Amino acid sequence: MSVPHNIDAVDRALIVATQQGLPLVARPYHAIAEQLELDPEEVIARMRRLLELGVIRRIGVVPNHYAIGYRANGMSVWDVPDEVIDELGERVGQLEFVSHCYRRPRRLPHWRYNMFAMVHGKTRDEVEEKVAQIAELLGEHVRDYQILYSTRILKKTGLRISGG
């Protein structure tokens, strides 16, 4: 991965300080500012700029589903018509219980599914109920679907850079 030329040493230090998550305090940007000996307003402005540049893709919560009791994590895979997949994906992605939804190319003749929607639940029954809601939303466009359950956690982090 190349590093954009328009970030400086302070930006890099800010990325290193936040890439494993923001501190769990009332004012996380102030804590980062204190750690880096910066003004909190500068930290916030730089974070906004890094987001605009695409250096930081997003700031959000990444829950550890297993730690909070969601043991049944199912990737639902769907075979829907390519002509309507963008519209359908937008609708499915807006469901509160879908953590992410995206399009993938088919790998025919072995893999016919082109839309993926991750659903978490405390039990497989709960996941299956939620997937049934997706099926109802998709209606006549569903040609087939499956639920692929997670069996272990492979990765819960994004790309990391070193502090050097």
Image (cartoon, helix red, strand yellow):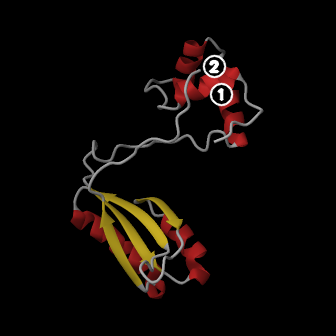
Q: Secondary structure at mark 2?
A: helix
Q: Nearer the viewer, residue 14 or 152?
A: 152
On the rendered structure, is 118 left or right of 150?
right
Q: Quadrant of residue 10?
A: top right
* Image position, residue 13 (x, y; %): 61, 22
Identified by mark 2, the residue type is Pro
- If the image is split into quadrants, where does the C terminus sit? top right
Looking at this view, name the residue that lies furthest to the right.
Answer: 6
* Image position, residue 80 (x, y; %): 49, 81
* Image position, residue 14 (x, y; %): 61, 25
Q: Which residue is mark 2?
A: 40
The residue under the point 35% across, 48% down is: 154
Identified by mark 1, the residue type is Ile
Above or below, 101 against 71 in this view is below
The residue under the point 77% across, 32% down is: 6
Above or below, 90 against 34 in this view is below
Q: Residues within 10 Å of mark 2 (few under 14, many from 20)?
A: some
- If the image is split into quadrants, where does the N terminus sit? top right
Cα distance in 3D space between marks 2 and 1: 6 Å
The residue under the point 56% across, 76% down is: 85
Q: Mark 1 and mark 2 in contact (Cβ < 8 Å)?
A: yes
Q: Which residue is mark 1?
A: 44
The residue under the point 60% across, 73% down is: 86
Q: Nearer the viewer, residue 3 or 74?
A: 3
Q: Secondary structure at mark 1?
A: helix
